[in-house]
Amino acid sequence: MSIQLRNPWWIVLGSVLGLIVGNVTVLQFSASVLMKPIMAEFGWNRSVLSAAVMLGSFCAAAATPFVGRLIDKHGVKPITLFAITFFALSTAAMSLAPAVAPVFIGMFCVLGVFSGGQAPLPYAKSIAGAFDRRRGLAMGIAMTGVGLGTALIPKLAQVYLDNLGWRGAYVALGATVFLIAFPAVALFLSEPAARRGGSTPGALPGLEARQVVRTKEFWILSFVFFCIPVVANGIIVHLVPLLTDRGIPSQQAVAIFSSIGASLIVGRLACGYLLDRFFAPHVAIAFIVIPALGVLTLLASTDPMLTTVGAVLVGIGLGAEVDLIGYLQSRYFGLRAFGQVYGYLFAIFTVGTGLGPFVMGATFDATGSYHPALVGFVVTLVCAGAALLRMPGKYPFPVHHTGNGAASASPNAASRIHPA
């Protein structure tokens, strides 16, 4: 019997480590640090780099549901270890990119495809199968890995950039991904209890994926988890350029950027704690209001201190949505098709993470300012909050016991949610 099967908190530790070098932190947040050096060498504007990030994210979105189905069928470990290996190799391969925009963008798309398996999906499935009563807290702690990655990866990217140039930085980032994530998954992650016992995924409680996509709840969550990353990632990927445009030195701008990692950690821990104690859609609304206040702060002032406060508030919101995806889908749709459904929702989420930076970059290139995009982002968050008010007031798959094991559900639980 392996370590993680004796104590489910080992799964949480492995998830924290793996997500430090997850797809978002490597694919997008390092791009904020490397954007200007690449532009300077190739003579490109911000739209080219933003398009690369956007299309890479779209490719990750397209790959994620496929990864989810493979994980449901073959298990968490084999699929995730394969994805980590090729994500690391494709990251290092970016060092070979030529000064040809279509080729650069194409290489970023390949990177995006393999990043789909080094996303929160496998970690969330492993945790959802191991925890019930403390599922929200366990997911919140696990997803702090993204916050740690947001704090560490930009700093590492800056160190690699200063010492190796942007090409060497990509090689070093690829090595970092493999050396951290591969051992974490191999040693600590495990399968949900039904698979460990030799049962089929159908033994887990919940709806089939084809049933889930016919419910209004699925489409409400899809809309919400599209809107939030459009705003959060749009701002965060462009934060270093936004700060330096306001006269803040690049080293200080990277330090401010890295401070967002702390806000992500706070957001994930707070969200996870609250999810186990309050109705999840209401918790989600609170974590939409917070980044909305952050965007308003960025609009209202160019003062470096207030800009930092606004960025941190946006980061708190970004720190919650991945927890919310896993928790809400497990309570509304169950665990039977968790990987595939999470793949659908995370694919939509990933499209938003790619579209936001592109909107920011294109807006700046067209107007010379980020202001119009920020105004649109406030409206986007208001719409997302309004949509959450339409979620049903009871979970079809609530907590059924007080242990830490896999969730169970009453036989008629699925009957409480109906296809639209």
Image (cartoon, grey):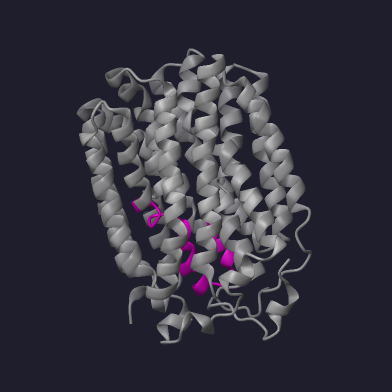
| The stretch drawn in magenta includes residue 122 | yes
Stretch in magenta: 114-140
- Above or below residue 394? Residue 322 is above
Q: Is residue 412 left or right of residue 159?
A: right
> Can residue 293 be spotted in the picture?
no
Question: In the rendered view of the protein, which quadrant contains the N terminus?
Answer: bottom left
- Above or below residue 240? Residue 349 is below
- Residue at the location (53% across, 59% down)? 344
Q: Nearer the viewer, residue 170 or 283?
A: 170
Q: Nearer the viewer, residue 294 or 363?
A: 363
| The stretch drawn in magenta includes residue 64 | no
Image quarter of residue 384 = top right
Image quarter of residue 197 = bottom left
> Can residue 229 be spotted in the picture?
yes
- Above or below residue 285? Residue 206 is below
Q: Is residue 122 left or right of residue 286?
A: left
Q: Is residue 1 left or right of residue 333?
A: left
On the image, the x and y values in percent for residue 103 come to 29, 34
- Residue at the location (45% across, 48% down)? 146
Q: How many marks?
A: 0
Q: Is residue 371 left or right of residue 145?
A: right
On the image, the x and y values in percent for residue 135 come to 57, 67
Q: Nearer the viewer, residue 269 or 339?
A: 339
Task: Please name the predominant secondary structure of the magenta segment in the image.
Answer: helix
On the image, the x and y values in percent for residue 402 come to 62, 78
Q: Residue furthest front?
A: 102
Question: In the rendered view of the protein, which quadrant contains the C terminus?
Answer: bottom right
- Residue at the location (56% across, 73% down)? 335
On the image, the x and y values in percent for residue 222 come to 62, 53
